[in-house]
Amino acid sequence: MNTLAASELVLNEDGSVYHLNLLPEDIAHKIILVGDPNRVAKVSQYFDKIEIKKNKREFYTHTGTLRGERITVMSSGIGTENIDIVMNELDALVNIDLKNKELKSEHTSLELFRLGTCGSVNPDIEVDNMLVTQNVVGLDGLLHFYQDYHFENEFSKNFLEHFPYEKIKPMLYFSDWAEDISDYYKDAKYHGNTATFPGFYAPQGRQLRLKAVDDQFLETLNNLGVTNFEMETSAIYGLSKLLGHKALTVNCVIANRRRGEFSADHHASEKNMIEWVLERLVK
Ligand code: R1P
Ligand code: URA
């Protein structure tokens, strides 16, 4: 069996994975991923008890139990480059023997739930509601560095056929699992197609002092079926598919980009989303 070199699977002095600073026993197999490190305690306050609190850089982790079931909440910070680290190191915690640095013969699948915030690009999708992601369009580029993953459905075929920006190479993903467990989440106000970007401003069509490549960007993507914008889900869905994990994103809509509106109280809508997801996550 191949042993991974010290430069490839990097560990800290205590044997924990390099960025997440976690040992295999520090995580549950049901994991909530949030972008904002401050959201970790807003989730774990509902746990029966918290056993583990660890952090390094923007990666804060709390593990405990919720209604008796072991659960982890972790912050990823912003962006798909952080998700690359989170997904590979979480996977290493369950699928690589960290002591001898060899791949385990049995695969363990994690259940990952992103609880994030997003902006809507469909004028009818109102702020302060939740949107569950079915298809995701990656406009960030991360997955181009991994082995090919080919996926096709009606949404992806139509999107790729009509996507007009030659310099941007989209990659599309779909969560089968989101469909499998859609019963739990069917009362979310919106189910949609999320686009993930490598930035918050021009990549999402925002123009402060700098011009974005196209004034019609929001309308163009919305006409192709995209409902909302954020910065992590393509990497979560794509890497979950490649690594054999299950993933679902629920975002609360805090901006309606087409109407120029921002939530009057995004803390309240974030709290509402956390309570709504936790209610469904552990019965
Ligand atoms: C941008 O403000 C951040 O908010 C959204 C975006 O995806 C990006 O990470 O999600 P989170 O609220 O989970 O961080
Ligand atoms: N997060 C984003 O990435 N974009 C938005 O418009 C709102 C939250």
Image (cartoon, rainbow, N blue to C red):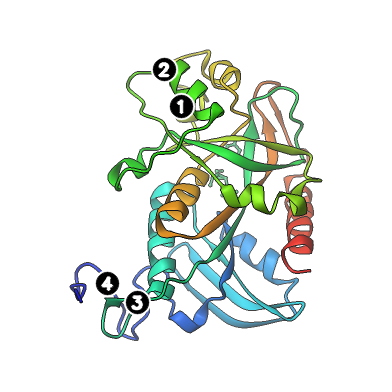
Q: Quadrant of residue 263?
A: top right
Cα–Cα gap, marks 3 and 1: 43 Å
Q: Which residue is mark 1?
A: 202
Counting residues from the N terminus, which is met first, the one under dot 4 or under dot 2? Answer: 4
Cα–Cα gap, marks 1 and 4: 35 Å
Q: How many marks?
A: 4
Q: Is mark 2 within 8 Å of ligand 2?
A: no
x and y percentages locating residue 163 in the rendered image: 45, 19
Counting residues from the N terminus, which is met first, the one under dot 2 or under dot 1? Answer: 1
Position of 223 compared to 163: left or right?
right
Up-down relation of residue 165 to residue 203 (above or below): above
Of residues 137 and 274, the one nearer the viewer is 137
Mark in the foreground, 3 or 1 = 3
Q: Which residue is mark 3?
A: 104
Quarter for ligand 2? top right
Mark in the foreground, 1 or 4 = 4
User: SS for tag 1?
Assistant: helix
